Image: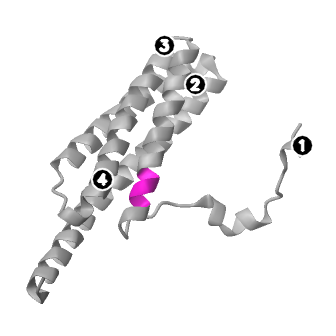
């Protein structure tokens, strides 16, 4: 490849990163919201009605993110990244559906589906952070407060 082709490829990647970063942030924020609602649903069935409106809003955000991911044009070097971003968006939508179902039905299989889809979306999102620069996620394990937190072994937990 010549320098002009390299420059054009670099520019395509930069454009992809620039247009994709807000979509990844939307997926990440919505995943955090749905995870929080899922926790609320799992620990307090009486508050399920409170989460339903918020879950519907999160589902709309997940649908918007999914549409934006599908509209992205990924250069060759970013196709693996785009694959995982698309996977994160799709499984986030599935998590929203599972959370809404779990809020209406007291069934363990719905809870299992909810946890499974949240984990899958999170895994895809974490993978995107390693494939291209500019998509790093916050790692609370690396925070300064994490080094000061007491480490507990399973036998110490009661």
Is residue 17 shown left or right of residue 121?
left
Q: Position of residue 31 (x, y in %)?
A: 45, 42
Q: Position of residue 60 (x, y in %)?
A: 31, 34
Between the residue at mark 2 and the residue at mark 1, the CA separation in whole angstroms equals 28 Å
Between the residue at mark 3 and the residue at mark 4, the CA separation in whole angstroms equals 29 Å
Counting residues from the start of the chain, the first of labels 3 and 1 encountered is 3
Up/down of 96 relative to 24, above or below:
above
Circle 2 is placed at which residue position? 41
Residue that appears at 10% across and 80% down: 5
Q: Where is residue 86 in the image (x, y as percent from the top left)?
A: 29, 45
Q: Nearer the viewer, mark 2 or mark 1?
A: 1
Circle 1 is placed at which residue position? 155
Counting residues from the start of the chain, the first of labels 3 and 4 encountered is 4
Q: What element carries label 3?
A: helix
Counting residues from the start of the chain, the first of labels 3 and 2 encountered is 2
Q: Quadrant of the N terminus?
A: bottom left
Residue that appears at 30% across and 53% down: 23
């Amino acid at each position: 490849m010549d320098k002009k082709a390299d420059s054009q490829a670099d520019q395509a990647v930069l454009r992809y990163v620039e247009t994709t970063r807000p979509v990844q942030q939307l997926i990440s924020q919505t995943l955090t919201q749905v995870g929080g609602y899922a926790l609320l649903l799992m620990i307090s069935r009486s508050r399920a009605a409170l989460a339903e409106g918020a879950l519907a809003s999160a589902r709309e955000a997940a649908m918007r993110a999914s549409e934006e991911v599908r509209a992205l044009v990924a250069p060759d070097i970013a196709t693996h990244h785009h694959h995982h971003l698309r996977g994160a968006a799709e499984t986030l939508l599935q998590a929203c559906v599972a959370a809404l179902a779990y809020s209406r039905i007291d069934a363990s299989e719905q809870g299992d589906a909810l946890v499974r889809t949240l984990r899958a979306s999170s895994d895809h999102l974490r993978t995107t952070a390693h494939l291209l620069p500019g998509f790093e996620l916050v790692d609370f394990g690396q925070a300064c407060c994490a080094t000061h937190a007491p480490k507990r072994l399973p036998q110490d937990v009661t």
